[in-house]
Image: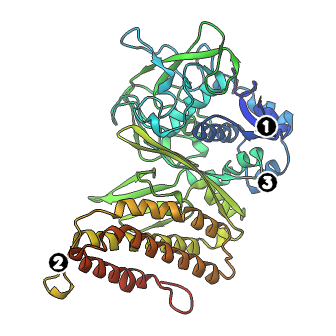
Amino acid sequence: MNLLIDAWIPIQQTGLQEKITLEELLCDDKEGDLCLPRDDMELACLQLLVVITQVLFTPENKKALGHLYKQPMQKEIYLQACEGKYDWFDLNHPETPFMQFRGVKISSSSLTGLEKLLAGLDDGTNKVFINPQGLSDFLCGSCAAIALFNYANNCPNMGGGPGGGIKAGLRGNCPISVLVGGKNLRETVWLNVLTEESLATLMPWYESTKNQRPNYIDRVSSGEKISINELGLTRGLLWHPARFELLISRSLQKCSCCGDFGESYDSFRKEPFGYQINGAWPHPFSSRMFIVKKGEKIDYFPSFNSTAPTWSGLTKYFMTSFDHKSGFQEVPVIAQAKKFGIGPLQFIVGGYRSSKAMIEERRHELLNLPLGWDKNTIILDQTVRMCLGYKNALENALVKFGEGIKDKKNPQNSFLGAGTQLAPLYVNIFYQQTESLIYDALATLNFSDPDNDLEQLYSQLKKIVLSLFEQATAPYQQEPKMLKALAASRRLLNNKYLKDLEIPQGGSNE
């Protein structure tokens, strides 16, 4: 199967499912939404579509991108760009199969089941997902290609550290991916393609590396040390961090993922392979963060490391902020959308929450921002901070209720706590009860006069905080020994934590 020729893109329209070619999507404006049984596979498929389009058809500037975005591409242009690249995207190529390595060596005759390619199927936490039974028995070429790309870009490693093993991708274990959503699939793809002007700003070495090929074609030597400025656009986007080789089933089979019948894969070989990447390659779909430790700047990509909803980390996607100790840089595709004045905007945010290379949760969310978001990121940042402030108020009050206070300077302020840990549970409940409220508020915020909208939002958040505090402490209100802790923590909540969040007359809370 060849990703530039064959029908591999699974779409659905009015309940009917089919697979279309990349040429049909870009040149014929074939309509439909991506359709796979798992949201992470759909997001990986979208990323793969953007990556192939970016590699083949990088537009020169905003005008060229706008032309491609507004109307379908001419087929002559498509075929011309594909010339000389077909071997890169052939899943069964005899020498350079797509994102694979021929001649993978294994220590024994045992092969690896495809469940290792589908994140979360074989790590002991499958119960938290909704996965059809037998999802990894056989994979067609389309689903296999998407799974390969997903592992290379979005999944935790299969073992091994910086010096070797089965590595994770250039962004590390389970990075958060953020893309821009359009009105349809073709528009969404183009909205996430960077122009040459944007790329020159993102990676100053872009021009000198334009002729690079993927690492599964021009291979890396074992033990090689690679600087990020040696990785061009094509090599970085199509980088596979490990050596895999898919094995075709001896007979035609029904794909366990999408249901298509035909040639399929039933296992793969994997081989540990060591190399070292120095630095954080500026991936178009991720924000970059850094901290300074012992005078050394350490770059990394954010990931979902808690159950906090996506809105709580929204700032690091659409803003750049830093000082001498730490900072973050906005997602490149978002930076370009902001520069070009694209709006209203829909974010597509996804990734995995993992622990010790085990996936604990899949995340896939859509966030809407209204017209004017690109010129009012400070207001958005302040709004997110305020929403987190209400979460912190509830959390702090419940922590004090449980732990008490020892104040030697002012003993009258001291009290014994209830000896219970209520905060973690009720912080999660706060997130659950406020998620849709906050998303709706962000999506409809009137930037020309935001005060009224924000006042209503904060008023509702305050009511939820007070209600949850009473709900959490209700079982202890009949215990005489708990009354002082209850009264003191309630007083702190009302007279300090919530009062500190009140916006003075005139607007800004800064």
Amino acid residing under circle 2: Lys
Badge 2 crowding class, 10 Å Cα cut-off, few under 14, some 14 to 19, many 20 or more, is: some
| Residue 292: % across, % down | 33, 60
Which SS class for mark 2?
A: loop
Q: Which residue is mark 2?
A: 406
Q: Which residue is mark 1?
A: 15
Labels 3, 2: front one:
2
Left or right of residue 280: residue 475? left
Up-down: is 313 above or below 413? above
Mark closer to the chain start, 3 or 2: 3
Left or right of residue 119: residue 59? right
For residue 441, say whether it is visible: yes
Amino acid residing under circle 3: Gly
Left or right of residue 473: residue 331? right
Q: Residue at x 48, y 62 (%)?
A: 431
Query: What is the C-alpha distance between the residues marked 2 and 1?
Result: 63 Å
Up-down: is 448 above or below 127? below
| Residue 85: % across, % down | 69, 27
Q: Residue at x 52, y 69 (%)?
A: 384
- Closer to us: 135 or 115: 135
